[in-house]
Image: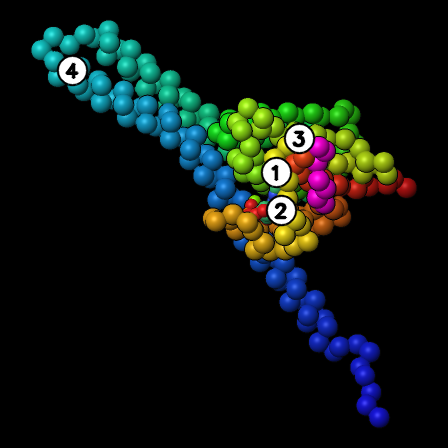
Amino acid sequence: MNTVPIMNPGSLKTDDDSRRLQDRLLHVSRLAAVGEMASGIAHELNQPLAAVANYAQACERLLGLPNPDLEEVRDALRQIAAQAVRAGDIINRLRGLTRAREARGEPSDVNSLIRELNDLIESDARHHQARCRIELAEPLPSIVLERTQIQQVVLALVRNALEALAAMPAAAREVRVRTGRAADGDVQIEVCDNGPGVSPDIVQRLFDPFCTTKPAGTGLGLASSRTIARAHGGTLEHRPNNPGGACFVLRLPVPTRR
Ligand SMILES: Nc1ncnc2c1ncn2[C@@H]1O[C@H](COP(=O)(O)OP(=O)(O)O)[C@@H](O)[C@H]1O
Ligand SMILES: [Mg+2]
């Protein structure tokens, strides 16, 4: 009679393999999130840089005239300085995010982590001609978490919402980011939109890597976000919004004190 091995002797190796795969996935998805963010930042930086180039050309042209109007040149130079400050501000916001990345697993207030993203979210929403409401429930208990990772999740969910809203008329587009407590005490962050909702074709595979309906999508946003949620002992789930659209709920457990 054949015996069926109860435990696969390779199972330890399989665990290792799957951990490595998860790590790689996390790495790839971090790159994807950074890429998405970088394209947003590039867009924001382009405007002040283009303005600097225009004003500099104007200065050159003005100074080439037989009787240059120095007041006009001075105005253009002031504009150049102002636009350079604006570009610097954008870079400082980025720095704020990288600093957070160095701090690993610190007790954090979820609301403050979302407040830090406020400017980025608002500029992304503006760029997508959508309104964004941020509603923070105070106070929330402190949770040990990797701030940048949770921020990546929120940004990925907001970006998905904004991309879904492209299908709606601009005046109606709305994203809501809300913090609060679940019935069992978990801290939760909800990102909801009033877009077309998740397509029924993919609702079962939504969190699978590479599941995407977008021509240039990576299909890694939700997969990596769920990996991050689970690494924090939490969950990331989808539910339809009412009356229409999609909601994504990130839940993070509050450590119990003994
Ligand atoms: N807010 C949303 N509304 C509608 N569909 C969504 C929403 N968020 C995600 N999806 C669907 O889930 C798919 C996977 O999302 P994601 O993992 O972030 O990858 P990507 O954004 O690169 O496609 C998207 O292609 C889209 O079809
Ligand atoms: Mg995405």
Label 1 SS: loop
CB at mark 2 closer than 8 A to ligand 1? yes
The local crowd at label 1, few if under 14, some if 14 to 19, many if 20 or more residues have their Cα within 10 Å, is some
Residue at the (24%, 6%) spot, across then down: 71
Give the left or right position of residue 63, taking residue 129 as reference: left
Query: Label 4: which residue?
Result: 63
Q: Position of residue 114 (x, y in %)?
A: 64, 30
Q: Is residue 31 visible?
A: no
Q: Amino acid at mark 4?
A: Leu
Q: Where does ligand 1 appear, by image quarter? A: top right
Residue at the (45%, 39%) spot, across then down: 39
Q: Amino acid at mark 3?
A: Val
Q: CA distance from mark 1 to mark 4?
A: 55 Å
* Magenta part of the chain: 237-243
Query: Label 2: which residue?
Result: 199
Q: Position of residue 221 (x, y in %)?
A: 58, 47
Give the left or right position of residue 30, taking residue 44 as reference: right
Query: Label 3: which residue?
Result: 177
CB at mark 1 closer than 8 A to ligand 1? yes
